[in-house]
Amino acid sequence: MAVSVLGELLITAGLVLGLFVVYSLWWTNVIADREADRQADKVRDHWAQGGTAPGGPGALDTGDGIGFLHVPAMSGGEILVEKGTSAKVLNDGVAGYYTDPVKAVLPTSGKKGNFSLAAHRDGHGAKFHNIDKIKKGDPIVFETKDTWYVYKAYAILPETSKYNVDVLDAVPKESGRTKPGHYITLTTCTPVYTSRYRYVVWGELVRTEKVDSERTPPAELR
Amino acid sequence: MGYGRDGMYGWIWRHLPGNAWIKALISIVLVLAVVYVLFQYVFPWAEPLLPFNDVTVDNS
């Protein structure tokens, strides 16, 4: 009697764990992609209506969406970029720029610094799932309302401690750079399906291109 | 205990009303309800407590 109830509980626990895997790796992607699409449409509409630059008046209804990241090496299309790296932001299937512990320097500011981003490796849109496909020299393009910022990946750190906040520095020394410049940093967790370490890709700005009326993508994305 | 020989699922089955078809139907509804509660409430609550999905670097 007791044995059969115990057996049923064990089977039930197994089923619940199995369902949790389905939830983590599939369902969270479904809802995150839906939410990301919705917010991305809002940003695009806002741009089309001639909205002002992020942070200006009328920026409220775009969420904190400031632009789109295009990384052909990762495929998977464009990734909306929003402010902050809290779970609440990232769980919407977007990439977030760091506000803490080291504040990201937005490319739109024109200042030298590090545009540091984070996104999920698995679940919740898994926008940086294929980060390991990025090789040195691959383009990383950030699209804003008016400008394409074309970066080139120049350094990769396949595994580092999750406490290694130095990778976000304005001049990320671990990437081999010692002088101030316009850098971009992508961070996510590694190995896949865990959060033991962090994977970091650094890029630097090669050039910028004005967005034309057709929003023709720069050569790197064609 | 009141579970008899067949465990708790057997106990539930015997306490559902109607014939076998109606019992089966109610069982499916119950299963779907449990899955819904898990996906909608339990898993979203449990996920941040598990170390699978931290992607940022930080000091803490």
Image (spheres, coloured by chain):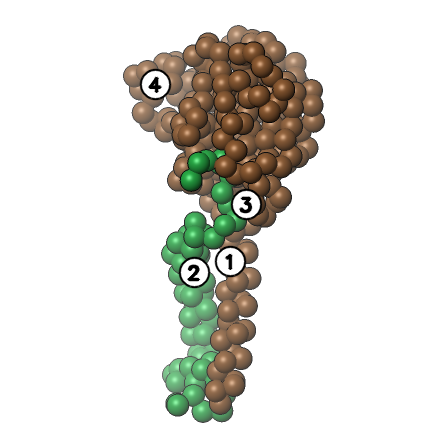
Q: Chain of mark 2?
A: B
SS state under label 3:
loop
In the rendered image of the structure, the colour used to display chain B is: green
User: Is tag 3's residue or tag 4's residue first in the polypeptide sequence?
Assistant: 4
Q: Amino acid at mark 1?
A: Phe
User: Is tag 4's residue or tag 1's residue first in the polypeptide sequence?
Assistant: 1
Q: Chain of mark 4?
A: A
Q: Of discs 3 and 2, which sits in the foreground?
A: 3
Q: Amino acid at mark 3?
A: Ser
Instruction: Examine the image and state in which quarter residue A99 appears.
Output: top left
Alpha carbon distance from label 1 to label 3: 17 Å
How crowded pointer 3 is (Cα within 10 Å; few <14, some 14-19, many 20+) is rated as many
How crowded pointer 4 is (Cα within 10 Å; few <14, some 14-19, many 20+) is rated as few
Q: Compare residues A18 and B13 and report the one nearer the observer.
A: A18
SS state under label 1:
helix
Q: Amino acid at mark 4?
A: Gly
The residue located at (68%, 33%) in the rendering is: A133
Q: Is residue A55 above or below residue A76?
A: above
The image shows residue A178 at horizontal and vertical percentages of 58, 14
The answer to whether residue A76 is visible is: no
Residue where numbered disc 3 is placed: A195
The image shows residue A106 at horizontal and vertical percentages of 45, 18
Q: Which chain is brown in the rendering? A: A
Q: Compare residues B24 and B52 and report the one nearer the observer.
A: B52
